[in-house]
Image: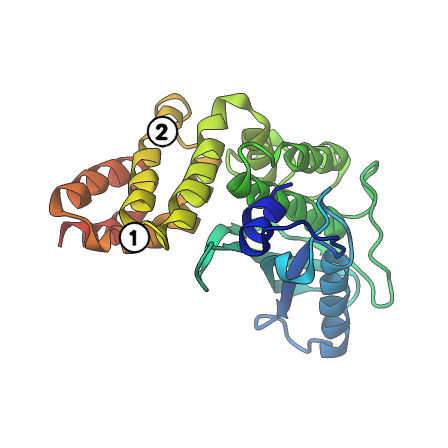
Amino acid sequence: MKRLLVLFVFITGGICHLSAQDLNARVQILSPQVQNTNKQALTSLQSLIRDFLNGRKWSADNLQSQERIDCSFVINVTEWDGSANFKAEAQIQSSRPVYGTTYNSTVLNISDKDFNFQWSQGQPLDYSDQAYLNNLTSLLAYYAYIIVGMDSDTFSRFSGSPYYVKAQTVVNNAQTAGFTGWKAFESLRNRFWLAENFNNRDYAPVRQVLYTYHRQGLDVMSDNLEKGRKAIFSSLPDLQIIDKQKQGSIINQVFFTAKADEIVNIAGQADPKTRMDLYNLLSSLNPPNIPKYELLKK
């Protein structure tokens, strides 16, 4: 009872019988660096990936079509041997609607530089939660569960937990795969660590902020701008707990990659002291985005 309670009950005041899949995914495959690309094969793969993401049940909720989670997968093929071996990068984004507005707030915006896989034209996209079958469907399922988990967390406190567990299962199943991104020792900021962070209670403050920021902040602003804005600003210091204990963690980076611009926009009409306090906090928590936060001092 996540999106139903937040969006549908508020709007209709009643309970509806719902049926649909979970994602409204847009998929784009690019290949500007690949010569003599078989465009037909990539077009076919693009359709297969879109159908795979949109045609499966990833969550336990029953959503109407207008409640499906908007997301996008932009896959940039950097190398292709013309057969089955692909090297690629992917940009994955998701957003959720803000109550009482037409605005969609970005929840996830992540770049995966190791989105490599094998696929042959005509090959179906098979997947199982119980076993690793191939890297492409494991990648897609992993990010589908992360998207659903984060979306759930923004509507109901800590309700994304079952989906982060599923993402961790995808990681565990892929440990014997010959592809980069699944193993702890390969990087401190890869798929392994993102799933680990979301499942680790030490990072619960970030998930709490996801809920407060969206449900008590953004969703309130159309009725009470100051109340919603205050909830957002007062939630952000909780991220210092993670920053002090777990410096360099991927979960903080993922949060700010999605939210830096939005926070600056929300703070645009705040008083000078509030903006300066935010600048000091955000520049400490998220140094890579300091140029964006400089706007808060103007």
**Residue under the image location 36 percent in, 29 percent down:** 238
Q: Is residue 107 above or below residue 245?
A: below
Image position, residue 225 (x, y; %): 30, 51
Viewer-proximal residue, 193 or 219? 219
- From the top left corner, tell me how far across and down residue 160 is, in percent: 61, 36
Query: Quick one: label 1, few (<14), some, or many (20+) residues within 10 Å?
Result: some
Q: Is residue 188 left or right of residue 269?
A: right
Q: Is residue 61 above or below residue 200?
A: below
Q: Residues within 10 Å of mark 2 (few under 14, many from 20)?
A: some
Q: Let me know if residue 147 appears in the view.
A: no
What's the colour scheme? rainbow
Residue tagged by mark 2? Answer: 238
Q: Secondary structure at mark 1?
A: helix
Residue drawn at point x = 36 percent, y = 52 percent: 223
In the rendered structure, which amino acid carries the disc numbered 1?
Ile
Q: Mark 1 — residue?
A: 266
